[in-house]
Image (spheres, rainbow, N blue to C red):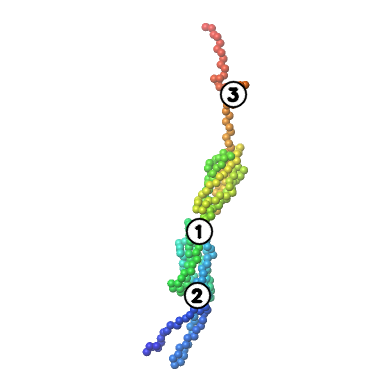
Amino acid sequence: MPEGSSSANFTAHTTRVTSETQVTVEAYLNGKVTATLTVTPQVFISDITLSLRSVLGGDSLTGAVTLEGPAPRGGVTAILESSKPAVLQVPASVPVPAGSRTVAFTATTSRVTTPTSVTISGMLDWEVNGGWFGAYVWVNPPPPSVSGLVFSPSPVVGGNSATGTVTLSGPALGGGSTLAVVSSNPAVVQVPASVTVPTGGTSTTFTATTSSVTAQAQVQVRAVLNGSVQATLRVDPASPAVPGPFSLSSPGNGVSEVPLAPTLTQLPQPRPKNRRF
């Protein structure tokens, strides 16, 4: 202690503890004084977990920050950060109460047009320049829905086929998008039970076969995927055959054609009578 001073400072170094510990410090000078120092355990983040590994843009998910031990007296604060805040938003910080090891938080997402990976990182407030602990989640665009169905040709003569084209509202996700296809009259128009738009595609085609009909038929075909669309395929009967010249066999080896009806010029003309002048 410097001359003339009545007090002096000193540094007490502590070691890491796993539980709160009371330490008595004694000072001697012509007597003794004591003071109690409370040493609390220093905790770190041991895990960040998310309720989902994949979420649709616009939906929310929950997360949890877990400490390696109970939070000390006064609690601690976990600082959170999103690697893409325009896509996924987290609270800037969440408090962990004293004695607790886990605290939950909610993350919200924005709509996206392509699958996007986002990392959520966390550290405790006392960890100056400390390491971040993180977890990732995929934010996906909404699944596409069916938006159109057309046939070509339409109408079609019974017994022939038509090509159907289905269109999606957006690109098919990984693994493709499968649509159900239903005919209102399978006896006249037959369609596959389902068709698949390949990954990244927005449309696909299928074949609709038809049966012969004696009268015109209007058949509704429906495609279903997160909604439904409907198109009408008209099936016409085949046109009747047009009658033409027919042939009769002659007694000889040849064939002579006989017209269906004689023309006026072929009718026998009356022979003029002899007149006297």
Q: Earlier in the sequence, mark 2 or mark 3?
A: 2
Residue 31's place in the image compared with 95, above or below, is below
Q: Residue at x 60, y 39 (%)?
A: 212
Q: Residue at x 45, y 88 (%)?
A: 27
Q: Residue at x 48, y 61 (%)?
A: 117
Q: Which residue is mark 3?
A: 255
Name the kind of residue labelled 2 in the image.
Val
Q: Secondary structure at mark 2?
A: loop
Q: Which mark is residue 16?
A: none
Whether residue 6 appears in this view of the structure is yes
- C-alpha span from label 2 to label 3: 112 Å
**Which of the pair 58/266 is nearer the observer?**
266
Q: Residue furthest bottom?
A: 30
Disc 3 packing (10 Å; few <14; some 14–19; many ≥20):
few
Q: Which residue is mark 1?
A: 140
Q: Mark 1 or 3, which is nearer the eye?
A: 3
Name the kind of residue labelled 1 in the image.
Asn
Disc 2 packing (10 Å; few <14; some 14–19; many ≥20):
many
- C-alpha span from label 1 to label 3: 78 Å
Quadrant containing the N terminus is bottom left
Residue 223's x, y, as percent? 56, 49
Whether residue 261 appears in this view of the structure is no
Q: Residue furthest top?
A: 277
Q: Residue furthest front?
A: 253
Q: How many marks?
A: 3
Q: Which residue is mark 2?
A: 43
